[in-house]
Image: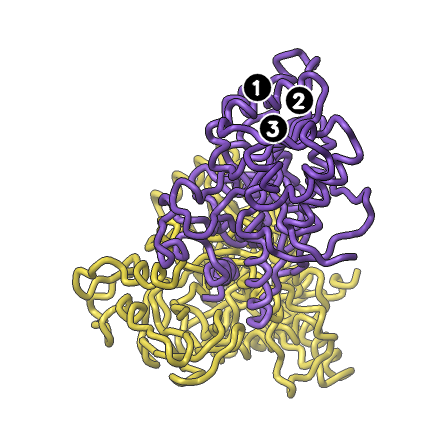
Amino acid sequence: MATKVIMPKLSPTMEEGQISRWLKKEGDKVSMGEPLAEIDTDKATMEMQALANGVLRKILINEGQPAPLGQIIAVIGEPNEDISSLLAEAPAAAPKPEQKKPEPEQPAPAPAPPQPKVAAAAAAGTGGDGRQPQAATSDSARLIVSPLAARMAAEAGLDLRSLQGSGPGGRIIKRDIEVALSQPKTSPAPAAFPRAVEPGRFPQAAASGYRDEPASEIRKTIAKRLVTSLGPVPHFFLTTEIEMDRAAEMRRGINALDPELKISINDVIIKVAAAALIQHPEVNASFQEKFVRYYEHADIGVAVAIEEGLITPVVRSADQKSLSEIAAEVRELAERARSRKLKPEEYTGATFSISNLGMFGIDEFTAVINPPEGAILAVGAMSAKPVVRDNEVIVRQMMRVTMSCDHRVIDGATGAKFLQTFKKILENPLYLVV
Amino acid sequence: MATITIREALNQALREELARDETVFLMGEEVAEYDGAYKVSRGLLHEFGPRRVIDTPITELGFAGLGVGAAMAGLRPIIEFMTFNFSILATDQIINSAAKMLYMSGGQINIPIVFRGPGGSAFQVSSQHSQALESWYAYFPGLKVVMPSTPADAKGLLKSAIRDDDPVVFIEQERMYGNKGEVPDDPDFTIPLGVADVKREGTDVTIVARSLMVPLALKAAEALEQQGVSCEVIDPRTIRPLDIDTIVESVKKTNRVVLAEESHPICGVNAEISSEIMERAFDYLDAPVKRVSGADVPMPYAKNLENLAIPDVERIVAAVREVAYLD
């Protein structure tokens, strides 16, 4: 029987996708698990795999055109099979962009006569006992999943909402779980990329563990009061100036040992921020209305400018990684961010973010917190400046950082203490090894 | 091992048990002088005489009741119904007397009786003479219900039924008397009641089939193997007590199940099996349990309609492909 190919949910926030490229033509043979098309989601370009065997009979959404989640975008079937009943379910070709409400399936080109599907199934002899074959459900919001697939997903820690069901009515079945589990955890890194660490050690998709503590009344009052003043995430800003000579020297020293490592100052900043966050767990936290979530590890989001905007790939457990690991990982993530090949789990769920505009010569700026994170650090350019030390004016490499804090979870003094530690380590990076 | 028909296997079982235990006797319409309407009792009158092989008038309720009384008195009657369609007349004796006597006598009076004869669909004998009644009898606590699908099962199970101390309803399939198969020569060969048989091992889909559906399920499994689907075929053989464990274990392995039966779907045996699977193996199911049943209409007389009313290989294949998500 022919199978509908529907627009899958490829990112947690995706509502529609655009066909970037069909990897198969009409008439091509396809088998389950084979890449079928590239889909532009709101965040990245992702590969969509075929979930049925057969021939790509009909492409309903052309390259460059968008389709809402769950909409039929192609049909896979046997070469000579009659697929007219499936095509009848498709919206009229070339949908007008302006009236694109994500309609809950079954957009009616005309009041359709009773599903031809039932008649076909009865003719095939499956309805002989007087019961109708399953009617395809039209409720695209409801997750349909076989009991076995639900159990397998739970055991494997798979998010069912990230899967596209290949069963009737989009039911997620065993083979969908098997296909999902057979996919490589990380996409292969470009061969030219020099590796200072063995590939298995990063990037773990697993987000940091955490503990939730009930929000105290004072916490709740602070949250309530400040939100009325400053919007849902009441920001405040803390700025400090940091002497970077020793950090810069350390970086030069390491890179002299092994030029392959290519450690940047930003990598050092990530490492130091992670170390400081572990010392100040109250900053590595997130306000969740009823409780405050404290994370075990520092999963650091690193803002990367891309053509279409901004994306923050996450270095998981940066507190546990070496500088060389962080450097290699950031480079690899940024590269894939620019080619829009990041997977959703690679750019969501940070516990703290860093935005660095130093390369643009910005001395100082404020960044906007990416909820539900508790803070973001805005890093300016490093430059030689006269400073007073022991009553003498000397020249030092100075850098200004501004931390935006969510006042619902971080108070002024809390943030200041964190920045103090951050500054102390960055000015004396030997603390990293003490 | 000799290759014989189900008819011959049943005849052997009767002969061996009549010879083994002199309290065993056979009673029914045409069982003696005529050698049985379906020739299952061929030669038994000659061999065991008219005290042990007894022709009755056309009075199902009467001779079923005689049998229950004889069982209460310590004999081991085998009551043959010319077909199970006529057992309907005897249900008061089968259900209200035979099935309940042990319970109602506080465990003092057991009824070691076998009610046997052909059942299920026959060839063009229309609605009243072509129907599957096993779910009626399987409904009642106190009865055991057996349905063999091969000569070996027929012989081994009938011998166990005759030796069993409880009433057993033993339904032979009318269309299958001529089916051949190997039967062990051992005169003491028996098959315990309540044990299912895996007729074919497989990994992708379990087909549960009994009686007439077993050979069809095996043919379907062969066809499906050509299509790359490995089917496990399970024959419960005894409907009550039902060996649900073997079925559930198989479903846990294959995650998908098709239940085939020639009886009507409503309140059929497979409705019960389906419910048991749902209760015991819910987290192992990758597809809804699929039943293939006889049509929910009285059996038509016309050959073409009769064929449509009984499940065939194609319908079993289609059901398997459906639960395997192949179509």
Res. B206 visible in picture:
no
Say which quarter of the image contains residue B196: top right
Q: Which chain is yellow?
A: A
Viewer-nearest of labels 3 and 2? 2
Q: State if disc 1 and disc 2 touch (CB < 8 Å).
A: yes
Viewer-nearest of labels 1 and 3? 1
User: Which quadrant holds the N terminus of chain B?
Assistant: bottom right
Q: Circle 3 sits in a helix, a strand or a loop, which is it?
A: loop
In this view, B76 is above or below A8: above
Give the class, few, some or many, for how many residues have Cα within 10 Å of label 3's Cα (few <14, many ≥20).
Answer: many
Which of disc 2 and disc 3 is earlier in sequence? 2
User: Which quadrant holds the C terminus of chain B?
Assistant: bottom left
Q: Going 55% across and 58% down the picture, which residue do you hit?
A: B216
| Residue A183 in the figure: left or right of residue B126 | right
Residue at the spot of label 3:
B143
Give the class, few, some or many, for how many residues have Cα within 10 Å of label 1's Cα (few <14, many ≥20).
Answer: some
Structural distance between the alpha carbons of marks 1 and 3: 11 Å
Residue at the spot of label 2:
B111
Structural distance between the alpha carbons of marks 2 and 1: 9 Å
Q: Circle 2 sits in a helix, a strand or a loop, which is it?
A: loop
Q: Circle 1 sits in a helix, a strand or a loop, which is it?
A: helix
Say which quarter of the image contains residue A116: bottom left
Point out which mark residue B97 bears. 1
| Residue B220 in the figure: left or right of residue A132 | right
Check chain identity for marks 2 and 1: say if they share one: yes
Check chain identity for marks 1 and 3: say if they share one: yes
Which of disc 1 and disc 2 is earlier in sequence? 1
Q: Amino acid at mark 1?
A: Ser
| Residue A85 horizontal/vertical position (percent) | 29, 68
